[in-house]
Image: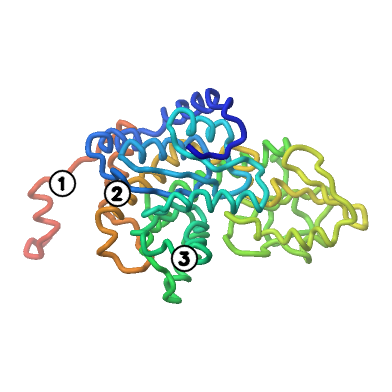
Amino acid sequence: MDYDIKDIELAEKGQLRIEWAEQNMPVLRLIRKRFKKERPLAGVRVAACLHVTTETAMLMETLKTGGADIALCASNPLSTQDDVAASLVKHVGIPVFAIKGEDHKTYYKHLQSALAHRPVLTMDDGADLVSQIHGDWSHMAKDVVGGTEETTTGVIRLRSMAKDGVLKFPVISVNDANTKHFFDNRYGTGQSTIDGILRATNRLLAGSVFMADAAAVGDFFCTVTGDLKVIRKDHFQVMKDGAIIANSGHFNVEIDIPALERLAKRKRIIRDFVEEYTMEDGRRINLLGEGRLINLASAEGHPASVMDMSFANQALSAEYIVKQGKKLQKQVYPVPVEIDQEIARLKLDGMGIKIDKLTKEQEKYLASWEMGT
């Protein structure tokens, strides 16, 4: 099996961390149990471009249990957990192409290694696989039944492609499922971003100032927009000494790093994941995690209990694409509501929460117009 990871000897540590995450992922456990019995993805070649974390490992194991033949690469140069990558290779037998801190050239080499798997299903977090298939790898588009997309940035790219009529196969926007964005995008990103900033800086938050519209007085600045140059030259020019800037959006374009480079007279790595830029007037501006996803660059990403629902959407959307993909148009589709609701039901079951069902009389009343007050 071909793979490219940092160190296979990290596999045992990675396996323990995966087992820890599994304890808080009851929905995927239930889906994996059904997939083992039904094998809905038998023989389906999948190329996945996702953050290589403990939670992703649970998704990969679920897909493989369902019969999928998978190749995995990272969706961000700094988001790989090297011990998890090693465990997936050694214990699950999945070819992984991901190394934390890989350079630009290696990142795209790894994308190409995943695509060399000749997928019929793509699984993206940021739409890099789809973009490659619509570029240099366009010859394989005819074999792709469909794909899934995890995050806001990727969905924006895909909807733009669909609008321009260039999207070559249907893609399901996992990001738009209620059981994904109401929890992952809000609570997961919120907690993991703060976690990443604190791990990188060890600064006290109490008494600090986060202000999007006050560059001159802020202590911390964090972008989460999915757009480019949200923090730029005119902001850097008035930031106070010691200001800390970070990004938790998918790509590092949200901070205008080239402008920061031009303004600085020198820079240095002052601690892990912290680059100190010194301006001509002596002010120091600290960039965290190279401007990449700080919640994954310096921390571990979202909690497992949140990613449980996000990746349940990925697993069930993959099953849906395999069954229905040939009937779909070359568009971006939401997660079918019945899948979203099933994941919500499974999550509540996993938490020991029950919901009353309407009686037949109540259903009749709500559906009728004859019965007045």
* Left or right, residue 339 beside residue 103: left
360, 183: nearer the viewer: 183
114, 320: nearer the viewer: 114
User: Which is in the foreground here, disc 2 or disc 3?
Assistant: 3
SS of the residue under disc 1:
loop
Residue under the point 72% across and 35% down: 202
* Left or right, residue 231 beside residue 320: right
Q: Percent x, y for residue 39?
A: 26, 40
Residue under the point 29% across and 53% down: 322
Residue under the point 48% across and 33% down: 88
Q: In the image, is residue 275 above or below residue 81? A: below
What amino acid type is highlighted by mark number 1?
Leu
Question: Is residue 353 at least partly visible in the picture?
Answer: no
- Find disc 2 in the rendering and name its residue: 319
- Find disc 1 in the rendering and name its residue: 358
- Find disc 3 in the rendering and name its residue: 138
Q: Percent x, y for residue 162?
A: 42, 71
Q: Residue furthest bottom?
A: 164
136, 319: nearer the viewer: 136
Among numbered discs 1 and 2, the one appearing first in the sequence: 2
What amino acid type is highlighted by mark number 3?
Ser
The answer for how far apart the CA atoms under marks 1 and 2 are is: 30 Å
User: Which is in the foreground here, disc 1 or disc 3?
Assistant: 3
SS of the residue under disc 2:
helix
What amino acid type is highlighted by mark number 2?
Glu
Among numbered discs 2 and 3, the one appearing first in the sequence: 3
Q: In the image, is residue 99 above or below residue 258? A: above
Among numbered discs 1 and 3, the one appearing first in the sequence: 3
Q: Percent x, y for residue 132?
A: 51, 61
